[in-house]
Amino acid sequence: MAAKDESDNAEELRAEIADLRTELENLRQQRDEELARVFREIALDRQRLTRLETPPDPTPSQKDRADILKALLAASGSKLLVSEARKKMHLSKSQFSQLLASMEPDIELKPYKLDKRQKILQLK
């Protein structure tokens, strides 16, 4: 009888070990799936951040306004006060600011020597 009890006990232990191995494999698979999901989310977040960090392409109206501003600067000897340029173009402060941001490589902003509160636009 002792041999039978040991045999039954060994079988129970083998069955329990098999169950634990199956459970361990399931846990590993869940972990791998969760890691893959987290890595996908990180990649998507990086893409979103890149889109937010890069300035949008100028719209056609901004391109037209940029051409008009360049023509104004050329006509005035390539220097013009920001306030005068904005008034001549009939743009709000925010629209003009967006226009200047889109034209950053082409135009320089410098402080006006006589009045440091004002800025001068200059073609590069």
Image: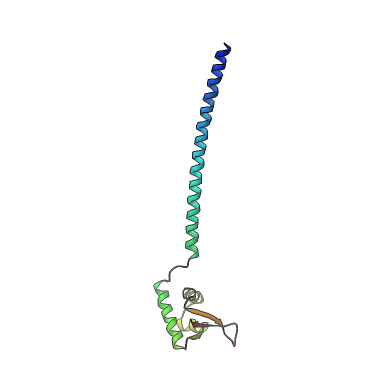
Position of the N terminus by quadrant: top right
- Nearer the observer, 14 or 113: 14
Q: Is residue 5 left or right of residue 71?
A: right
Percent coordinates x, y for residue 15 in the rendering: 52, 24
Instruction: Indicate how the structure is coloured in the image.
Output: rainbow
Q: Residue at x 47, y 55 (%)?
A: 44
- Quarter of the image for residue 111 reads bottom right
Percent coordinates x, y for residue 39 in the rendering: 50, 50
Q: Residue at x 42, y 84 (%)?
A: 71
Q: Residue at x 44, y 88 (%)?
A: 75
Count numbered badges in the picture: 0
- Depicted 31 relative to depicted 60: above or below: above
Percent coordinates x, y for residue 14 in the rendering: 53, 24
- Quarter of the image for residue 112 reads bottom right
Work out which residue is located at the far top of the displayed protein and give it. Answer: 1
Percent coordinates x, y for residue 30 in the rendering: 50, 40
Q: Residue at x 48, y 54 (%)?
A: 43
- Depicted 47 relative to depicted 30: above or below: below
Q: Is residue 73 left or right of residue 1?
A: left
